[in-house]
Every structure is written in structure tokens, then in C-alpha cells.
Amino acid sequence: MSDLDKRAYPRVHLTRPMVLEDGHGTRVKATLRDTTPRGLKAVCDRKSAQALIPREKRGQDRQTLRLTARFKLPNGADLARIEVECRVAHLSIIPDEGLVAIGLSFLSFKGESGKALRRFLVESLEPA
């Protein structure tokens, strides 16, 4: 069974700037590559990934590794601000790009962020 067959929801692929922040206030710039109702994939350089998730923490139970993700998504003619607390689900190297992919699972949205994300996903998946 392929990864696509296991997914509960389709991914919406996009390229948007974002900021990831750990619980100690360390912030790094990253790129949002895709999102679903349950999580997202962020991509950043290795130095940024190391700042957020030090090597010694990578073997720990990932339930304890949490980051806040902040980004904007199209919302009609405007941009909706999204802020969501996430847990780190996985890390992987993108060999041909030399970047790190960070899979994040959503835990809790700030304000209307969850509603704005759902609206973006519905609009993105509707047939043209």
C-alpha cells in the first residue's frame, strides 16, 4: 500500500513562507510545502532544523517535541494568518535540495486559525 493510499485526507501543495518557534523562543524561517486538515510539511535548512530540534532530542518521544507554526494562507482577496501549536511527527532530509522536511501534526489553533485553514483547504480541493 502506498503512502497516498494510507492518507485520510489529500495534501494541498503550496509554497508559502512561514516561521517555526520552539518553546524556548527560538524562531526560524521555513517554507510551508503542503498541508492537510491534520498537519503540514515545513522545509528549512539544516542549521535551522538543528536550532529547533537539537540532535540529542531527535531520539526522544516525539510527543514531547512541540513547535508553533505561523504562516498566511490565501483567503479570498486577503491573507488569513494561521497560528497553530504542533507536535513533530517526523524529520527527513531532502537529498537533492539539502534541506530538512519537518512533518508537523496539529494540536491546537489560535483564534480563528483552524476555521481559516479549513476554508483554504475546501477552496483548494474544489473542482474549478
Image (tube, grey):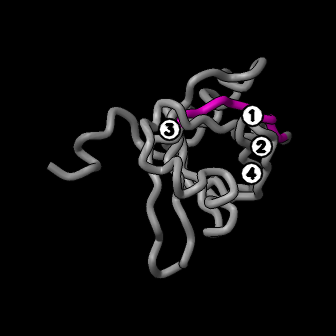
Q: Which of marks 4 and 3 is in front?
A: 4
Pinpoint residue 117: horizontal percent, then vertical percent: 65, 31
Report the residue marked by disc 1. 82
Report the residue marked by disc 2. 72
Q: Do the residues labelled 2 and 1 touch (CB within 8 Å)?
A: yes
- Residue drawn where x is 75% and y is 22% of the image: 110
Q: Is residue 78 visible?
A: yes
Query: In the rendered image of this protein, does residue 117 appear above or below residue 46?
Result: above
- How many angstroms separate mark 4 from mark 3 (CA)? 16 Å
Circle 1 Cα neighbour tier, 10 Å, few/some/many (<14 / 14–19 / ≥20): many
**Type of amino acid at the residue the image marks with label 4:** Met
Decide whether residue 14 is among the magenta residues: no
Report the residue marked by disc 4. 18
- Residue drawn where x is 46% and y is 46% of the image: 11
- How many angstroms separate mark 2 from mark 4 (CA)? 8 Å
Q: Which disc number belongs to residue 36?
A: 3
Which of the pair 64/111 is nearer the observer? 64
Q: Which of marks 2 and 4 is in front?
A: 4
**Type of amino acid at the residue the image marks with label 3:** Thr
- How many angstroms separate mark 3 from mark 2 (CA)? 15 Å
Which of the pair 1/116 is nearer the observer? 1
**Type of amino acid at the residue the image marks with label 2:** Lys
Looking at marks 3 and 1 on the same chain, the residue that comes earlier in the sequence is marked by 3
